[in-house]
Amino acid sequence: MRIGMALSYSGGFKETVEELADYEKAGLDIVYVAEAYSFDAVSQMGYIAAKTERVEIASGILNIYSRTPTALAQTAAGLDYVSEGRFTLGIGASGPQVIEGFHGVPYTAPLGRTREIIEICRQVWRRERLQHQGKYYTMPLPEGQGTGLGKPLKIINHPVRADIPILVAAIGPKNVELTAEIANGWEPIFYLPEKAADVWGASLAAGKAKRDASLGDLDVVGQAPLAIGDDVQGFLEFGRPMAALYIGGMGAKGRNFYNDLCRRYGWEKEAEEIQDLYLDGKKDEAAAKVPYELLEKMSLIGSEGHVRERLAAMKESGVTTLNVSPIAGDHKGRLALIEKVKEMAADL
């Protein structure tokens, strides 16, 4: 099981990247860089590539709407080049509020667009002359659109790899099925190992039945906050505001994918209450309604024995990469957590 970590830089981006070298020495396998509607992730990942030597670098995630498919392919090839083959292209559909609100682009056909984007990226990385006639993307533009001067081109540079790994963030049944069929990796949010098979098992099986064997096994990335000790149980409460934000506020009524997931986990009543409270501006009350079991089962927080049990449950459910958020008072403490969880994962 690989150990990854989401980059967090509340203390300053450059300072955090300088510390990343210590995590690299401690055995961290991969670092994920978010974008959402913050600074772009690409410039940050380029900086990380220059400051590290071994750790893999992944976008976590780039949305599929604000860049053209070929821009995504160019970006991935460029980052793979400057990192000497250490890049993973993490993509996802994000949600209507971000895509239409921040980017001003219609949120349409996430599944169809994802499939075509992956096809186009791989065609670019193979240095084929780009010709794609899909439902959502056409290269070159056909007669009657544009100037009519477009022609099939191939990327000028020779990519380091023609098979840059593609990770898809997905939680809906059809999205997960598509991911299992055509992607290298899958990253769900709020991953509960005990409920994963019930919620996603059928979708994963359907996708894998159509999967090209040349892709290899699907990398399953589970996320979890991490704290080890006999006095850390209270850290579970740190997860309440974020869970409430996603379940309650990341989408309108009927269009909140995280709320849907909470319902599919079996907390229909709580999901509705959280959303009603959050959308009514009662964020603290919404956070208080987040089920304790959800916070506990998607975390690696507790005694060493408890964390070992949770790690085993993650692995048993199919997780192959664990993306942790170490909780400690300083860099030394967080570093020790990475070293410890790396050691514990190796013992499984």
Image (cartoon, rainbow, N blue to C red):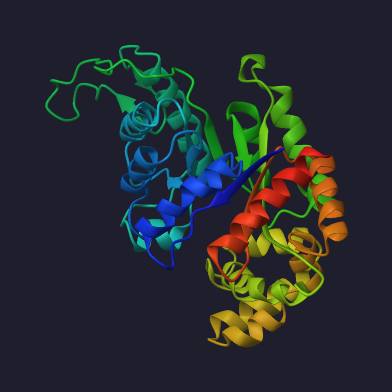
What x and y, as percent, mark residue 31?
A: 52, 45
Left/right of residue 78 with respect to residue 151 in the rendered view: right
At 43% from the left and 57% from the top, the residue drawn is 16
173 shown above or below 73: below
Q: Residue at x 87, y 53 (%)?
A: 309
Vertical side of 258 occupied by 82: above or below: above
Name the image quarter holding the N terminus: top right
Name the residue at 70% across, 80% down. 273
Q: How many marks?
A: 0
Q: Residue at x 80, y 61 (%)?
A: 297
Which of the 4 image quarters holds residue 220?
top right
Would residue 37 be seen by someone viewing this image from the given angle? no
Image quadrant containing the C terminus: top right
Q: Is residue 25 left or right of residue 135?
A: right
Q: Nearer the viewer, residue 41 or 212?
A: 41
Front one among 322 and 95: 322
Residue 312 vs residue 186: left or right? Answer: right
Q: Position of residue 153 (x, y in %)?
A: 24, 16
Residue 191 vs 329, above or below: the answer is above
Any part of residue 301 in sight: yes
Q: Position of residue 340 (x, y in %)?
A: 72, 51
Q: Position of residue 207 (x, y in %)?
A: 69, 30
